[in-house]
Amino acid sequence: MRKTFFMMLIALLTLASCSSEEDILELEYEKSTRSVDTLPPNPYVGSMLMQRMFLQIDLDEENTEDLRSCLQSIGTYYKRWYNCLIAVISEQPIARIYQKKMEIAASYSPVYNTIAVKDTPGNKEMPYIEELLHAGQDRVYAGGIEQYTDKGKPNIEFEASLTRDLIFYVGGGVYASGAGTDNVEEYQEWIEELCWSEVGGVNVFPSEERVLGLKLYFDKFQQMLGYYQMMELFKKRNSAYDKEILYTLGPEYIGFVYDSL
């Protein structure tokens, strides 16, 4: 069963060069929400968080509902690990979320503090989570993330995907969005080791130091793979991410989440 699951994920990510990033994100979200065993969410959570986290919402009915559903998920299913994100954005709300014609599903602008959403129909709950995490990074990193739109872009993009995977893993969901096209099994094994705790065998969200320090040897790559090596493999999946990695820039947002728990 586990081998079959890995093969399905490998096939999915191999198609990334031919498929859109948003298609992958939608499938990940669908699987992850199905796999979480929890009490039914409070139906008012999503609406409440929309009011707290956005100053202006210019979305059609379908995209508005996707946003509400996304916020309901992070405010209910994965609340413990997203509380710090909700708090930091509520202190400095996103100025506007709106629709526009563009190729990608959604995009956060650190310049204008806005989120733009693709104006065509489609499940955007997972892309919303991605852009909300970028908004969180923008508030956590000194000087914001605008300085990393070229050099350091892989750092920001990979950390956001890894953060989501770590939260999904410890929360009972699927965790493969930060993998490249040929390292799904290795990436997932690394995540499992990152989150392992000897205390009761319970999975925990790792510290920034653990994420930076843990490397595992994989025969397939004939080398030790850790945070920056996984980032190298990740950035090759999308040409927009294939920019210079800053090896002096650590996963500060992951540290922020860990310190907030």
Image (spheres, rainbow, N blue to C red):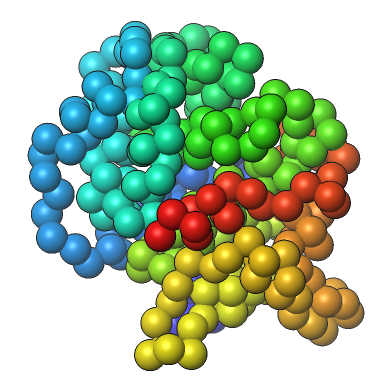
**Is 194 positioned to the left or the right of 74 in the image?**
right
- Locate residue 69 relative to residue 89 in the image: left or right: left
The percent position of residue 20, horizontal first and vertical second, equals 59, 36
Quarter residue 46 falls in? top left
Instruction: Name which residue lies at 40% across and 22% down.
Output: 93
- For the C terminus, the image quarter is bottom left
Residue 57 in the image: state x and y as whole percent. 33, 13
Q: Residue at x 42, y 12 (%)?
A: 96
Q: Residue 145, how many percent across, how many down?
A: 67, 30
Q: Nearer the viewer, residue 210 or 175?
A: 210
Residue 149 figure quarter: top right
Q: Is residue 76 left or right of residue 195?
A: left
Given residues 26 and 248, the one toward you in this image is 248
Q: Can residue 103 be spotted in the picture? A: no
Residue name at image x 38 percent, y 90 percent: 200
Residue occupying image coordinates x 64% and y 49%: 252
Classify 221 as above or below 48. below
Q: Is residue 225 visible?
A: yes
Q: How many marks?
A: 0
Q: Position of residue 5 (x, y in %)?
A: 49, 72
